[in-house]
Structures are given as C-alpha cells and as structure tokens.
Image: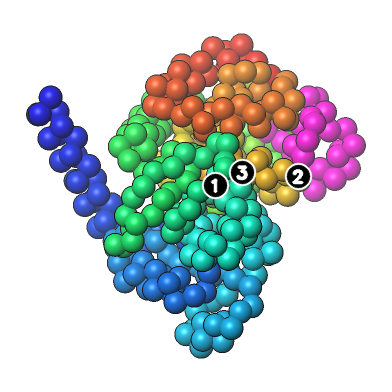
C-alpha cells in the first residue's frame, strides 16, 4: 500500500511539473473570466497572471456600475460586460472557467444565476467561496495561486485519466493512419476520378468550450453542396437545429458508399492527432447547427473535447431524435471514464459494419 501511494504521489507531481513547463510557454492556457471588479478581484487576477505555469489567461472582468469602477478602469483592465450580459458573453465566446470574486452577501442572486449558467453549459466555475443549490455540478476544494477556492464542474478536470485519454488518442490515431494508409490512398483516388473538386472537405466546427477548428472529411458531396443547402432546408428530416436528409441529392455515388461505411470520417484521425478532437466524445457541430441551440444545457456538450464516435454513434446515429442525442451526450459527460471510452470504441465497430443510422 505504501509503495502504491508513493507511485501515485510521484506521478502526480511529475504530471504537474511537465504541465507547468508547457503552460509557462503559453500553450494549453485556459481562458478565465472574473466576475467582480473590486480590489480582491484585481489582486486575484494579478496573482494568476504572475504565474504563467498555472496555465491561465484572464480574458476580462464582468461587473455592474459601482463607485469603485472608475478606479478599475484606470488600472487598464478590460470590462467585457455587465452582470446581465454575462449569459450572452459565455454563449458566444471561448470561456473555460468563471471565477466569482463578488461579495456574496450583496450579490447572492447574481452569483446563484452565474453558477446555474455555468452548470448548464459545462463551464468550470470557481468562487471565493459560497454554497449553491446545483443538480449536476460536483465540487472540490483546492488552492490556486495561494487562494483557497471551491471549484464546481460537470465534466472531467485535468488529471491522469484525462492525460491517459489524450495519450491513447495520439497512439491510436497515429497507428490507425499508418495501418489505414492504403484505404486512405485508394479513397482519395476514387473521389478524384469520379467527381470534380477537392478530395478533402474542410468545414469549420465548434470544439472544446466553443473553440472553432477545421474538421476534415473525405468529400462525399458535389462541390457546391454548401451553396445548395438553403434550397434543401425544407426537406430536413431531423428534429432540432441539426440538418440531415436520408436521400440527400448532393451526395455523389462514391460518397454514398463512403458514408455507409464511415470511411469518409477517417481524415478526422488527423484532427485527433492535432488535438482538435478525441477518438471518443460528442460529435463536433457546424456553426449553423450550433447557432440553432435554444437551451443552455445543450451547450454543456462543449465542456469536453469533441470526438469521432460517442454514445450517439452506437445507439442509432441519425435515426434518433435530436433531444435524445443531446441526452446521450450529457450521459457521456456525467459518466465518463476510460473504461466507457473503450466500450464505445468497441461498440462503434459493429455499428459501422451494420451501417446503423448512417446518413
């Protein structure tokens, strides 16, 4: 028991050390929004900024007008919005964490609303400190830059399981690209011979905490497919903001085969290798679909890295309603473990072979 405890402690210290080196060079930084403009909030921001190895970038402050706001503005700090504008700001910007530095006795109503908002969207929230009645968020007590904090979160935080998940992503995607290179080459040749246009279709998607990235797929549609989408909107067969047509007239003959076998998804292994995606996670959505979200809890799916496959893929894919799809994404986030990822990967193979729900 003593030896195993020593190994765990040593491994955690090593992980923290190497992450500190990476973050001190400006990489892998988490974007923090601070609610409050009082001296305590400014002091906390200064501590965070003075220690780049912690891996945080303060993107701005949120507060209403008060007698100390002139002093705050004179400090050169950025006020991004008032308290009533916080919901819109986090919906439309990359925010990894929200730190509340308000005097909670005076602003309890605001703090409670912010906590609920962060819980719904899966954004990590830290406060100095207080208690909120939340249904999903878990809490841990920790220290950051010398300040005691209570952290509320719904998705997985940093740690060995997340580190191992990323390591598996890199190893498996690299090996898959090597082993499947003949399939990739033959597919590229077939697309080029049977349809004018590029081999790879590149589309901007929404990733971790609403970061945008370019997702790659083998092109399965005619070159002007995006332009023709507006005229086909009325034929959409999926509920919610997502667009799907079973017999989409824009799909090429070879594209139909690539979709039914999921070969068109293989270039996303490059996205996994780059770190935009994971092997397992909620599917990344196009900007059009994201803008159609009507519920904040739908946005919680962006609290984890998007993936090539997830519970949705092994439970029917395009054949299940939008709300059920979102519920499966929430289930994945709430129940996430490395073992769950392995089970989903194993379940994806028979689902692909059967062509379950492919569109």
What predominant SS class does the magenta segment belong to?
loop
Callout 1 secondary element:
loop
| Magenta residue span | 220-247
Q: CA distance from mark 1 to mark 2?
A: 24 Å
Give the number of the disc on residue 120.
Answer: 3
Q: Position of residue 101 (x, y in %)?
A: 48, 65
Task: Judge whether 46 appears above or below 246 on screen.
Answer: below
Q: Is residue 304 visible?
A: no
Q: Quadrant of residue 41?
A: bottom left
Give the number of the disc on residue 294.
Answer: 2
Give the crowd class for mark 2: few <14, some 14-19, many >=20 residues within 10 Å.
Answer: few
Residue furthest front in the image: 105
For the point 59% across and 31% down, which residue is it? 329
Residue for badge 1: 132
Give the crowd class for mark 1: few <14, some 14-19, many >=20 residues within 10 Å.
Answer: few
Q: Earlier in the sequence, mark 3 or mark 1?
A: 3
Callout 2 secondary element:
loop
Q: Earlier in the sequence, mark 2 or mark 3?
A: 3
Question: Which residue is more in the foreground, 32 or 218?
Answer: 32
Q: Is residue 236 visible?
A: yes
For the point 72% across and 22% down, which residue is it? 320
Give the number of the disc on residue 259.
Answer: none
């Amino acid at each position: 028991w003593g030896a195993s405890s020593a190994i765990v402690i040593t491994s955690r210290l090593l992980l923290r050390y190497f992450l500190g080196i990476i973050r001190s060079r400006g990489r892998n930084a988490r974007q923090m929004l601070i609610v409050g403009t009082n001296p305590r909030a400014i002091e906390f921001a200064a501590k965070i900024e003075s220690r780049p190895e912690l891996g945080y970038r303060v993107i701005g402050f949120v507060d209403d007008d008060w007698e100390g706001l002139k002093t705050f503005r004179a400090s050169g700090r950025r006020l991004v919005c008032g308290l009533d504008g916080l919901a819109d700001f986090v919906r439309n910007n990359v925010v990894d964490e929200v730190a509340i530095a308000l005097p909670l006795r005076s602003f309890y109503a605001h703090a409670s609303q912010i906590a609920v908002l962060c819980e719904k969207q899966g954004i990590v929230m830290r406060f100095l400190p207080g208690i909120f009645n939340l249904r999903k968020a878990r809490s841990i007590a920790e220290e950051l830059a010398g300040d005691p904090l209570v952290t509320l979160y719904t998705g997985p935080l940093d740690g060995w399981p997340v580190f191992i998940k990323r390591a598996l992503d890199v190893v498996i995607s690299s090996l898959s690209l090597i082993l499947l290179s003949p399939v990739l080459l033959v597919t590229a040749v077939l697309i080029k011979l049977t349809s004018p246009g590029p081999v790879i279709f590149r589309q901007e998607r929404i990733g971790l905490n609403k970061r945008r990235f370019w997702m790659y797929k083998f092109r399965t549609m005619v070159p002007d497919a995006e332009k023709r989408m507006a005229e086909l909107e009325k034929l959409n067969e999926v509920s919610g903001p997502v667009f799907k047509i079973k017999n989409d007239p824009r799909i090429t003959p070879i594209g139909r085969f690539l979709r039914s076998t999921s070969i068109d998804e293989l270039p996303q292994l490059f996205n996994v290798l780059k770190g935009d995606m994971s092997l397992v996670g909620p599917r990344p959505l196009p900007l059009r679909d994201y803008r159609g979200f009507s519920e904040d809890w739908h946005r919680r799916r962006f609290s984890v890295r998007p993936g090539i496959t997830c519970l949705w893929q092994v439970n029917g894919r395009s054949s299940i309603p939008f709300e059920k799809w979102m519920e499966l994404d929430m289930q994945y986030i709430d129940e996430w473990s490395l073992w769950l990822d392995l089970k989903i990967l194993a379940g994806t193979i028979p689902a692909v072979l059967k062509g379950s729900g492919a569109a």
